[in-house]
Image (spheres, rainbow, N blue to C red):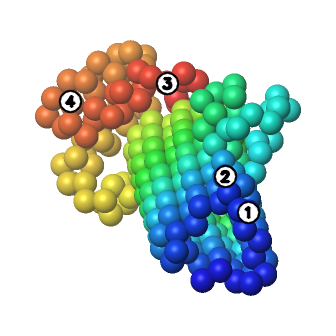
């Protein structure tokens, strides 16, 4: 059902069962798939594609032009997957031509009120972003990450799968998978053990990840030495491989 006060651009493609609340505005080149619910006073601009079974609450701004002075009206895009919850006052901007031209949000993410996702960010699946988390441009967040309220993530940073940022963390380097960080500036504080258990990691795997963490952060080894030791451990614990891959690919360097 589309409320009579909603304004829908003629070029928008809206599945027949999509619900759009009062006074919401759907702009040009927006596509919304089936089962998605749009609350009142939501603004969605395109080019934007929104998948199935999403819930977008009042006063969210989705697919607006990037907050980048270099942006010159290029037809950059936003893609949002399926099953996401996007709460009040969330802002998600499209990409820029200086990157791939795409901002992307995956599936089944829980995005709480006042979160900002800037241009060219790439988000995976099953992420929880607590209130007022703010991502600068070009940030990558892998699957199952949790960000505490008011976390600030600097541009071009990457957050590895299953990592956790504490309340008000200021993140200016990459966070390896499984690691918990907190503080201003953010420092490592162990692994996200509870998050791993909730996601059915075995006790043996959690124990191995703890040992890998100690090699990285408490052994006084150089990063290359710690990585070699973790690589040996990964022969018996394959869950350590994503940590090694992440460290090898890190462009900003890891929080350490």
| 147 sits left or right of 117 in the view | left
Q: Which mark is residue 29?
A: 2
Q: Are marks 1 and 2 in contact (CB under 8 Å)?
A: yes
Q: Dots 4 and 3: beta carbons under 8 Å?
A: no
Please name which of the two marks, 4 or 1, marks the residue nearer to the observer. Answer: 1
How far apart marks 1 and 2 lie (CA) works out to 8 Å
Mark number for residue 72?
Answer: none
Q: Residue placed at 38% from the left, 15% from the top?
A: 224
- Closer to the chain start, of discs 2 and 4, is 2
| Mark 4 residue element | helix
Q: Which mark is residue 250?
A: 3
Q: Residues within 10 Å of mark 4 (few under 14, many from 20)?
A: some
Q: CA distance from mark 3 to mark 2?
A: 35 Å
Direction from residue 228 to residue 35 in the image, left or right: right
Precedes in sequence: disc 4 or disc 3 = 4
Residue 101 % position (x, y): 64, 34
Q: Total marks drawn?
A: 4
In the rendered image, the residue lying farthest to the right is 69
N-term mark: 3 or 2: 2
Above or below: residue 37 compared with residue 212: below
Q: Assign a secondary structure to mark 1.
A: loop
* Residue at mark 4: 233
Residue at screen point 20% across, 30% down: 233
Labels 2 and 4 touching (C-beta < 8 A): no
The secondary element bearing badge 3 is classed as loop
Marks 3 and 2: CB-CB under 8 Å? no
Which residue is disc 1 drawn over? 9
222 on left or right of 15: left
**Quarter of the image containing the N terminus?**
bottom right
Inter-mark Cα distance, 4 to 3 = 21 Å
Q: Position of residue 241 (x, y in %)?
A: 28, 32
Labelled pair 3, 1 in contact (Cβ < 8 Å)? no
């Amino acid at each position: 059902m589309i409320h009579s006060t909603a304004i829908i651009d003629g070029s928008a493609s809206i599945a027949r069962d999509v619900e759009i609340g009062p006074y919401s505005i759907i702009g040009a080149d927006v596509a919304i798939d089936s089962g998605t619910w749009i609350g009142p006073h939501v603004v969605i601009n395109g080019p934007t594609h929104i998948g199935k079974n999403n819930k977008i609450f009042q006063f969210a701004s989705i697919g607006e032009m990037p907050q980048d002075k270099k942006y010159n009206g290029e037809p950059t895009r936003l893609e949002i997957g399926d099953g996401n919850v996007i709460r009040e006052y969330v802002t998600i901007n499209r990409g820029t031509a200086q990157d791939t031209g795409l901002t992307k949000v995956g599936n089944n993410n829980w995005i709480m009120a006042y979160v900002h996702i800037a241009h060219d960010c790439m988000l995976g699946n099953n992420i929880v972003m607590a209130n007022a988390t703010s991502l600068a441009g070009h940030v990558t967040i892998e699957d199952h990450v949790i960000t505490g309220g008011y976390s600030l993530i600097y541009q071009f940073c990457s957050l590895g799968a299953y990592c956790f940022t504490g309340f008000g963390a200021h993140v200016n380097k990459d966070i390896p998978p499984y690691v918990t960080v907190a503080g201003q500036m953010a420092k490592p504080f162990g692994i996200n053990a509870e998050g791993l258990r909730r996601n059915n990691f075995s006790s043996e795997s959690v124990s191995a990840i703890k040992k890998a963490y100690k090699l990285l952060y408490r052994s006084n080894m150089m990063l290359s030495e710690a990585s070699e030791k973790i690589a040996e451990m990964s022969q018996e614990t394959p869950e350590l491989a994503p940590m090694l891959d992440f460290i090898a690919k890190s462009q900003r360097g890891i929080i350490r």
